[in-house]
Image (cartoon, grey):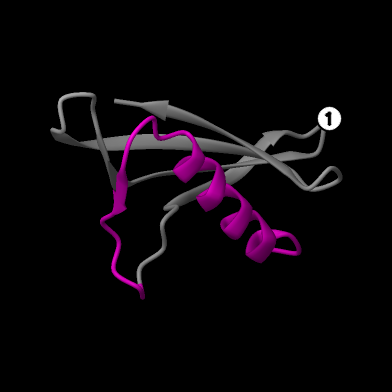
Amino acid sequence: KKHQSEMMATCATAVENAAKWDYEWTAAWYEPKFGDIYIADPGAGTLAAAGDKIKMQNGFGAWKRISYVCIFDPDKRHARAVIHD
C-alpha cells in the first residue's frame, strides 16, 4: 500500500511507452487500470500489477485489446511493462 500510488502512475506510463503506435485506455476515469497487484519477487522487493484495460494499434491501424504486466521496483522507482496480445 505504501508504494501503490506511485506504482500505478509509473506503471501506466510504462505500459503507454510499450505501445509501438497509438494506444487508448479503455478504463473509465473511476476504474483502476490494474486489477491485480501482487509481490513479484519478495527477495528483490519488487511488485507487479496486471491488467487488460488498454487497446493498442498495430502497423495497419487496427486496434486490439492488450493485457499487460508491470514490474515495479520501489527502491529504484522504475517500472518495466510486459505486453501480451
Q: Nearer the viewer, residue 42 or 71?
A: 71
Q: Is 16 within the magenta? A: yes
Query: Which three-letter amino acid code belongs to the residue tagged 1?
Result: Gly
Above or below, 4 relative to 48 = below
Reply above or below: 66 against 85.
below
Q: Is residue 56 above or below residue 83?
A: below
Q: Quadrant of the N terminus?
A: bottom right
Quarter location, residue 42: top right
Q: Residue at x 84, y 42 (%)?
A: 76
Q: Quadrant of the C terminus?
A: top left
Judge left or right: residue 17 versus residue 3. left
* SS state under label 1: loop
Q: Residue 46 vs residue 59: left or right?
A: right
Which residue is found at the position 41% from the left and 56% from the top?
33
Q: Which residues are drawn in magenta?
A: 1-30
Identify the residue position indicated by label 1 in the image: 43
Closest to the observer: 27 or 35? 27
Question: Quick check: 83 left or right of 40?
Answer: left
Query: Residue 29 in the image: x percent, y percent?
Result: 35, 73
Q: Position of residue 41 (x, y in %)?
A: 72, 30
Residue drawn where x is 45% and y is 44% of the image? 16
Q: Position of residue 11 (x, y in %)?
A: 57, 48
Q: Position of residue 5 (x, y in %)?
A: 64, 65
Residue 9 placement: quadrant: bottom right
On the rendered structure, is 78 left or right of 63?
right
